[in-house]
Image (tube, rainbow, N blue to C red):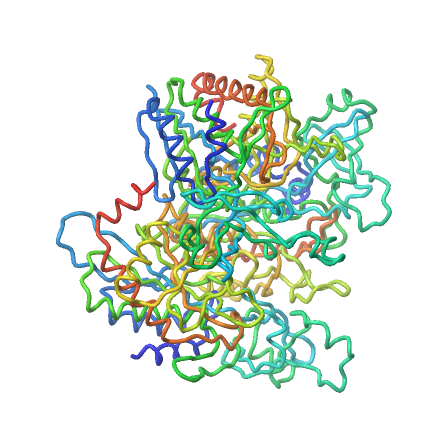
Amino acid sequence: MSIKDFLKKISSSPGVSGHEEQVARIIAQEFTRYTHEVNMDSLGNVLAFRKGQRTEEKEPIKILVSAHMDEIGLMVSKIEKGGFLRISPLGGIDPRSLLNQEVVVHGQQDLPGVIGAKSPHILDPEEIEKGIKMEKLFIDVGFSEEEVKKRVSVGDPVTINREFMELSGEHVAGKAMDDRAGVALVLKFLQELQYLNHQADVYAVATVQEEVGVRGAIVSAYNIIPHLGIAVDVTHGDMPGVAEYKTSEIEKGTVITTGPNIHPQIYNKLVEIAREYNIPYQEDITPGPTGTDARAFQISREGIATGLVSVPLRYMHTSVELISLKDIHASALLLARFTASLNNDFLEELISCY
Amino acid sequence: MLMIDIIKKLTEAYGPSGREEGIRDTIKKMIESYADEIIVDTLGNLIVRKKGPGKKIMLAAHMDEVGLIVTFIDENGFLRFSNVGGVSPHLLLGERVIFQNGAVGTIGCEKLESMKDLKFSKLYLDIGVSKEEEAREKVNIGDVAVYYRNCETLGSRILGKSLDDRIGCSVLVQTLMELNEPANDVYFVFTVQEEVGVRGARTAAYRLKPHYGLAVDVTRTGDTPESETMAVSLGKGPAIKIKDTLIISHPAVKKIMKEAAEKEGIPYQLEVLERGGTDSGAIHLSREGVPSGVMSIPCRYIHTPSEMADLEDIKNGVKLLKGILNQPLS
Amino acid sequence: MLLKELSEASGVSGGESEVRRLIKEAVEPYVDELKTDMLGNLIAFKSGSKKAPRLMLSAHMDEVGLIVAGFEESGLIRFSKVGGIDDRVLVSKTVLIGEKKIPGVIGAKAIHLQKPEERKKSLKVEELYIDIGAKSKEEAKKEVKLGDYVSYNTRYQEIGVNYAKGKAFDNRVGCALLIEALKKEYTFPLYGVFTVQEEVGMRGAAVAAYRIRPDLALVIEGTTAADVIELKEESYVTTLGKGPALTFMDTSVICDKKIIETLVELAEKENIPIQFRRFTGANTDAGKISLSREGVRSVVISVPCRYIHNPVNILSLEDVKNTLKLIELFLDKLPEGGKKQAYAND
């Protein structure tokens, strides 16, 4: 499947944190084509294993490359009189981006719904000035209370109903690009690996529950015990009104992060490889633990050497997240070349550099 | 022992986070004769095993309660303090508290321009002495006080301190007493330091490596005047947690719980809690991950001296828990 | 004691190399094994003659500081904070950037150029920049890289009566004490751990404790002393000159009561002044260590330091001496307490 088609498919699939089964199945199926074994763990992480081509007898280097497959979303918190549904956020979602969105309530069956909004005629002028709060929002599914209760229960997940959009050039937009774009990137990375020799054993992982506290990453890293853990995620793209040094430019290539959460040698190596193979890249810093799976990897068990590779994205945590496929391709190529470069000398360097 | 007597005894016992020795001994005595194995671990968790052939299930109810820790004693014998766990300074004015050794005191406040200025730094504890030396005979820096309240029954409702989570402890105790030859290998864990960051459950889960985790704790309700929008009420049965700040319950565990409730004809509610977490938050992320959930007992006024729960919910909680443990699990 | 050298070395969280090198050299002759792990923790091991108890004695090497986050066309450098820093202290300070220690100053718009209402507001990190005297982005990038760590440029100096001023006393004073403790011989296995990244979430301690599996842990820290004018005594947290501070509880840990009691007894017997930290906020490595694996009994012993996390701190050298005495007494006592007293269940 082409990366665009795959991204289209997974970005349109529902998979809010803790409810990733549906998108996980699609991902597992596609990862199977490029790996030797695919498993799901007790929290629902998809763990795909691709064996390295080894010449030496030594214990192989293990690299874990992850992207989270969960998306932010909503959950039914209460069924009110009249059949209106109250909602609770799953992950960091801006209630102001929800007003009058079309949604899908994933109840006994999927129900289309609308997040209600007063018409401007009956609004107080002050209300317009204030951002709306989550507890004031409700979903209207067009059923009476009695009928709703037959179909929906408290705790049912809700996603925004948004079709994948192809914009000009290689730009695409939609919901859940954070971090399905990363998942697509990992697929592309696996595809690229087919054409390269790599000694390292590769674990490609689509993690669950990143948006509620990198939970899938915590248990999957513990389980796999890799030497290296590379998180693949999205990062803020350039936009008016935000200082240039705080964002990365869309279509300017993959973003390599450094900072305390990142092993200095992994960062150096990624930059070196990007230069060597003329892969467009940009750099970014995070001054503490990053808001990605890398946060969990670094402190798993006795410590894992961590890296972070990202795709610039605008309008994060909304249903119109925008990215460029070019950046996905550049990032995947970088990761594949990086993985192919891994050997035991590098592993030793990761400790001896201190 | 009647359920209500267990509840009374456990809620009135002393045991803030980090100082659980007293409550632990009380529970230990109650359950000793029903247990196959008892361990107290490094942090002080009480781990009680009831053997069975099936899966290893870790049940967790936390023994600790919120409290106040003494940080300073002034020359006139007034004590300054900080909170242990989530205590709001607004609840404390005029409140009566008790230390482990039985010393009692009340809480006063400096003169304030406005109630908005009310912070812990403005409050002090008066233990009825007039000199620092006299105070030190009763209390030292680092000692922890808890609410001083009796447990009352108001019809089917129970009113008292530390229902969070001595109710959970009571449910575990009662279940253990009634459980004969469970279908699963059950570890009843009475955890420490939940109120300061689900700490005891973390190390206990690491030790036990359970197949399933289930916390039994209290949860908020949405059934009081102009309360938050929450679909949980007192008296409508124990709640099966869907999510809170620390966990999204595992689908398999939710299913087990629902099926057990339906099989036994026990009323239950579904709970989405926006703020708050329980021991399951730590258990489910232990090692390679543990499918976990929470059975919640609805409770009003959590972390105040007067928490309220419904005895029927608690009894149904015991029934539901027994139903779960008696089910052979895959 | 190496306090001066350690304090003047740069070691912002994630960039602890210089500090680690200093410590490595200092402890090498005294330990049986010395290694670093994936995160850069430095783990010194003294095997002792007995198998137990396994003690983890730890101090974090890192300090709060800044990191280079971007370049302006003008050659001015944008930065972010690493760890908890009050934005207001940064303006008009001097800094050292990266391993080459490129000097720079933190600038802001001169007060003359600010509007009256601007002058009343505190300056935020976004309004500040580091000036290394580069005339353009390209010139700046020749000397400084994105992601370079930036540390305060502060000289260590003894001042007043037995006080010292310097930077990063939180926690180079702990490192200096740990080095001293490693110089003596003990019968039990001792892991002296110099951790990384405490200031950004106690990350080094988490993985070190997992590796070591200690029976008990003692964390040496520099902690806040707020014994200054305009504060009442109950808010001092700790007081300079009154000896090492013991912690009952902070945001991350409730310290083991029995070990605290042992420390108090020892101090009383040997006439070492001690105080209790009168504050329950802030995190320490003990938080992560105590929750490692099946749990580890942990305590924190701190040297009071004024103005921590700021460019210049002040501590009492008398406190440093007394802290070392207390630590050494505890280590000498530990084998006696054995498994029963120090870390057994009741």
Q: Residue furthest top?
A: C270
Residue nearer the viewer, A164 or A235: A235
Image height of C103 relative to C305, above or below: below
Residue nearer the viewer, C212 or C233: C233
Q: Position of residue A32 (x, y in %)?
A: 27, 70
Q: Position of residue C162 (x, y in %)?
A: 60, 20
Residue B212, quarter of the rendered image: bottom left
Q: Position of residue C164 (x, y in %)?
A: 58, 26
Q: Position of residue C94 (x, y in %)?
A: 55, 42
Q: Residue at horizontal 46%, vertical 40%?
A: C11
Q: Is residue B248 among what the camera can see?
A: no
Residue C248, quarter of the rendered image: top right
For this view, does A52 lie left or right of residue A333? left
Q: Residue at horizontal 43%, vertical 18%?
A: C335
Residue nearer the viewer, B65 or C70: C70
For this view, does B147 lie left or right of residue A177? right
Residue B173, quarter of the rendered image: top right
Q: Residue furthest front?
A: C135
For this view, does B18 lie left or right of residue A251? right
For this view, does A82 lie left or right of residue C153? right
